[in-house]
Image (spheres, rainbow, N blue to C red):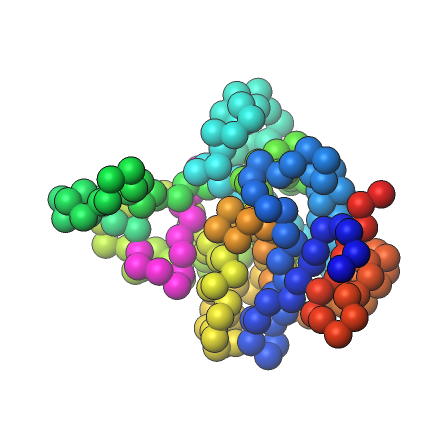
Amino acid sequence: MQSGVAVTQVHAGDRWEGWLVAVERFPIQLEVRGLVRDFIDRLTALVCLREKLAPECFLQYNQLHHENGPRRLSENGKAWMPQLGLGVWPDREPPALWTAEEFRELAPGEMIRPLMHQVFRITATAARRDALNAMFGTGVGLEMLVRQGDQELIQRTTQLLLPGIEEPSFRAFEFYVPLLEGKSLEDVDEAVLDDWLCGAQVYIRESPEDSGVLIVSSFPLVSAWREMRLTQVQGQPVWMLPIT
């Protein structure tokens, strides 16, 4: 296989496409970080122009500790205007407090599950791309692309995810957004994925669970790969982003 960064198709039902940009780990290695960041940046610009989409952008708190993330967020707070919300896995049990049984069942050296997955929404519209690019590669980025003029995404995601949460301390956030990983797409019904995406046409998440950047799209992206000069591995659903 030729050298480069692999962009591999993953199952996402019939109407949706799933792709994973393999990066090995987060933070992304510096030798390929700029390449992958520019690829995501170009893809977002291309599909937003072609499909008349606009981004909603978020930073995932659980990865923010990398590379002085809290300080960088604080320094840019005035420009980015972050709003605190909660990320929820729609294919998992809703967030809940730790139990005594969970602590008893921990194996030596095993970490307990994260208590919750907070996210910061970048509310300053003009700063959204700058914020994602500034933090890219540390594992914090998440964006959902919606039709231009659609102002209801956050309302829909909150209506989807909040009712399933019972613990009062997790019901007090201003908004809720879906968290997806590669295995979330396995054998999922397209109507269920429609519900999870809440009207977003494209979903892009730096996914430490997958060691890659997960892309979920409601329209085919192969033409975009060709336009961005990726090359397909013969006979495989894999495209290569060449390292220049």
Q: Horizontal placement of 119 versus 139: left or right? A: left
Q: Quadrant of the N terminus?
A: bottom right
Residue at x 49%, y 70% (from the top left corner)? 186
Q: Horizontal placement of 156 versus 206: left or right? A: left
Q: Horizontal placement of 18 versus 179: left or right? A: right
**Residue 129, x across and y down, in percent:** 68, 40
Instruction: Find out whether residue 158 is within the magenta segment.
Output: no
Residue 48 visible within the image: no
Residue 118 visible within the image: yes
Q: Horizontal placement of 109 versus 17: left or right? A: left
**Image quarter of residue 13:** bottom right
Residue at x 68%, y 33% (from the top left corner)? 30
Q: Is residue 138 above or below residue 200?
A: above
Residue at x 30%, y 51% (from the top left corner)? 95
Seen from the viewer's position, the closer of residues 97 and 157 is 97
Residue at x 70%, y 70% (from the top left corner)? 237
**Residue 56, x across and y down, in percent:** 59, 48
**Image quarter of residue 233:** bottom right
Q: Is residue 75 above or below residue 107?
A: above
**Residue 70, x across and y down, in percent:** 49, 25
**Image quarter of residue 72:** top right
Seen from the viewer's position, the closer of residues 112 and 94 is 112
Magenta residues?
84-94
Seen from the viewer's position, the closer of residues 136 and 202 is 136
**Residue 229, x across and y down, in percent:** 86, 57
